[in-house]
Image (cartoon, coloured by chain):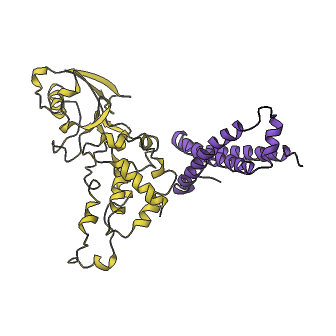
Chain colours: A purple, B yellow
Amino acid sequence: MITLRNLKGAQAHKWQRISAYYLLLYLPALAIYLASLSEYNSLADIVSNLYNSIFGIATVIAILFVFVHAWIGGRDILIDYMPRARTNFWLNSYFFFLILIALEFAFMVVSLNPYI
Amino acid sequence: MQITIDRFNPESDTKPHSQTYYLDDSKIADGSMLLEVLQQLREQDPSLAFRSSCQEGVCGSDGMNVNGQNCLSCITLAKPLGEKIHIRPLPGFPIIKDLIVDMEIFYQHYRDVKPYLQASTENSHDLSQEFLQSPEERAKLDGSYECIMCACCSSSCPSFWWNPDLFPGPAALLASNRFVIDSRDITTIDRLESHDRADNIFRCRHIQNCTAACPKGLNPSQAIQSLKHAIANK
């Protein structure tokens, strides 16, 4: 169980920064990648290409970092604004909510794979 | 001059209310401090309660919120505040009466950071032994030890308002940093680890209200940044 007392500060601070820097590099790269695609590419082709390129791996890492960033940012908001009596409940609920979205994402990655 | 003061008497009031006083401008000289205005008002209304002691910005007992800005009334000129002045108690603290607040939680956070030197035990029993520092090491402490504990910084900090029992506040963190950077202190790692929690120093968002409010011109925000840097790199 996640409790307010056992959440570390420095570790979260570092991961927040690492994920922010990565996304700062990734998002312009994503824009350039999309701009460089042929005008007549379908969405299915774009998704299919992601499974064949290094950029696809970079995209998976970026989405993982979005989860890390969202966890730390959301966690801090909950600590600041939630009534103390229910902070631990909301922290755990938020964490499991993110886990569910991550599982959904993993399912999507597998199900969209054109090679399976 | 119109002065509105937020008042609260726990013996007779259920919630704070504003009371407006008027003072003849001729009674306020160009160099009059706000504290003198309050003293004149107390002559009008002896029930008005506020703290003051040294009356020269050293003791830090007369911190209050004036026109939305925390300050010490004894070193704040009255005239530049305008014709209408609104005085409130320091935000974020329980009110004892009128402008007097209960600062116990503020002092508790200060005690919790152990604001005293913890030097090597080798020399601590020998009272004739000095803990020497180089002039450069001593110079690092400038801007860290001058705090007068008026609480103007902590009571202007939203992070302190949100989590007053967990977040130590700028004054306590400034004191903590003062001993972290002290070359004679040997408990640096312990001090840093005591702050390494999500509900402690990392609640600071560096909005710099503390630095803007400090009547001594100190920079608690920079000290907190320095502490965070030290914790992240320990």
Residue A50 position within the rendered picture, expressed as x and y whole percent measured from the top left: 78, 45
* Nearer-the-camera pick, B134 or A94: B134
Is residue B93 visible to us here? no
* Nearer-the-camera pick, B83 or B208: B208
* Nearer-the-camera pick, B181 or B170: B181
* In-image side of B11 versus A23 (left or right): left
* Nearer-the-camera pick, A73 or A23: A23
Q: Residue at x 21, y 47 (%)?
A: B59
In the figure, B104 relative to A11: above or below? above
Q: Residue at x 57, y 42 (%)?
A: A78
Residue B195 position within the rendered picture, expressed as x and y whole percent measured from the top left: 45, 57
In the figure, B62 relative to A52: above or below? above
- Dividing the picture into quadrants, the one containing residue B46 is top left
- Dividing the picture into quadrants, the one containing residue A94 is top right
- How many dots with numbers? 0
In the figure, B214 relative to B35: above or below? below
Q: Residue at the right extreme?
A: A116
Residue B162 position within the rendered picture, expressed as x and y whole percent measured from the top left: 46, 41
* In-image side of A111 versus B153 (left or right): right
